[in-house]
Amino acid sequence: MSKFAFEMEDLPREARIFAEKAARTIIEAQDNIESVTDIAILLEVMGITKDELEQNGFENIYDLAVYINGFVEFFEVKQDEKEVINSFLVKVPSKKKRMVESVAMIFPWMASLALFLVSGVSLWMASGLPSEDITVLMIGVFAGIFVTQGPLEVFQRLFIMNHNQLNTSAAKRTIRRNFYFVSVTVGITVFLFILFGYISNISPDLVLLSVMSLVTVSMHRASYMIVYALKKLKILVVSYSAALVSLFVTYYLTWYIIPDMLERYLASLGLAFAVLSISAFYAYHKTFNSSSKHEAHPSFYKSPKGITNTINARFIVQMWDSIPYYFLGTFLFIIMFGDRLLSWAFNPALDSTKTSLPLLFNTTYHSGADPAMLVFLATSIVQYMIMSGFYEELSNITLMNKTTQVNSVDKFLKRRYKKLILVSLATSSLVVIGLSYLGPEMMVQLGASEISLDILIVSSIGNVFISIFVANIMFATFMNRVKALAIIAMFAAVILVIGGLYFAQTGFEYIVYAYLGAAFASAVLSTAYVMRTIRKATNIYFARFS
């Protein structure tokens, strides 16, 4: 230590005033001084000259820093600890806001299903079309969802991460990679469709219809990834409302211009997807064209949004890390819709209909299985309400509790999981009871038979288990334990396919029991896994940041 440090008390009044002014300036720049070194660095930044030091009796910057260190804490503004913590707390969305968001997120499914049940026309199908046309259109729809479900799970996660980090360059790159990957996958699928049509001697017109449906659905889902990822709910609701209205109006008011039902439906469908595409472009434009120059930053600060070139992450590495999410999304789709495709293959109408198709849309099966989806849709609303704001609540708990109080985090996680499962079970069960009561009348309105009613009841019970499986997926995703859930989904999909082929031998209506078995297996196995994992939920949560 300098000899000067022991002679500080002999400084003249002007030197002490000089040092106090420097101390106040230091505290204004940094309110938490840890060492003499910190003071010395800040004094250097302040630009104190050697002449000023000598005029006030200091040999160098270090001597002044030692002197200031003796009293600098008196200039610090002592804040209440609670006020400091409160300044870092995150606002948790209200229940009303979460309710609105949850309804808006599933609005496309609910509105499309409602329009189809009322008018017989929707974004995926129109009743009254020839069975062959409906079959190839729906094959394209299912294939489009199948080939895009995995990529969307992967690229949506990457996009959200890039966007939250203000890494605009990487976010745009992720969107491009999403389109490239989906385009290549769709291109391969189109080639397989054409090859299969040629080998099976299927009409080129039917193959073309299927290809059109596949490409349209795939590109739409890829373009709306940004809308769902950023929860642009106004765009979502307005765009789908406009699309469904345009579809309905065009289909029913242009019959005198386009008398052919199929051509009229394709024209109305094309207009509807054009509306949706415009909305997707608007969402992209609004997200990336907001200039950072309007933000309140100092002149010397450059926002991360303004950086146009960042490190290019390797695509193969990103895909490898996201394989569990890819397979989880893909196999979950197989579980939820695979029974319908199996019912097409064992449709009795195949024997009496002159068609070259190996499958035929099974109206009887869909009349029961499609309305049963109301169980899953209703449960999705309450699940979203429970889990939305979950991260914010947990972040606030970790701030308000000390390290030794980690039990509070553990209790919160376990209570939230218990609430999620119980509410999901209660909601889905209530909807099943409602469908059981209203089922006969619904079947009359749809012109369906008793077979469809039986399928409705069994399928709705299966959707109770699917809702539990989805709840477990939500919690496992939070804990970064998705790999086991992907394996469970794959196992359940195998149960569905093997069980469906077995039950179909005695009648297509029994395929629904394979769906019930697959749903039950996925719910039980996933619950057992999450229950075992949640025993060390706190350790898993904090391990994410290590």
Image (spheres, grey):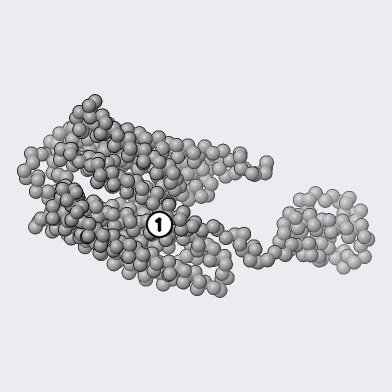
Kindly identify the amino acid type of the residue bearing the numbered disc 1: Tyr
Toward the left, the furthest residue is 352
- The structure residue drawn at horizontal position 75% and vertical position 62%, both measured from the top left corner, is 76
**Residue highlighted by disc 1:** 384
- Residue 419 x, y percent position in the rendering: 39, 67
Q: Is residue 464 left or right of residue 447?
A: right
The crowd level at tag 1 (other Cα within 10 Å; few <14, some 14-19, many 20+) is many
Toward the top, the furthest residue is 257
- The structure residue drawn at horizontal position 12% and vertical position 50%, both measured from the top left corner, is 346
Quarter placement of the N terminus: bottom right
- The structure residue drawn at horizontal position 55% and vertical position 58%, both measured from the top left corner, is 90
Is residue 59 in sight in this rendering?
A: no
Q: Is residue 319 left or right of residue 440?
A: right
Q: Is residue 219 left or right of residue 281?
A: left
- The structure residue drawn at horizontal position 33% and vertical position 67%, both measured from the top left corner, is 527
Describe the element under mark 1 as helix, strand or loop: helix
- Residue 126 x, y percent position in the rendering: 22, 40
Which quadrant of the view contains residue 403?
bottom right
Question: Which of the pair 315/272 is nearer the observer?
Answer: 272
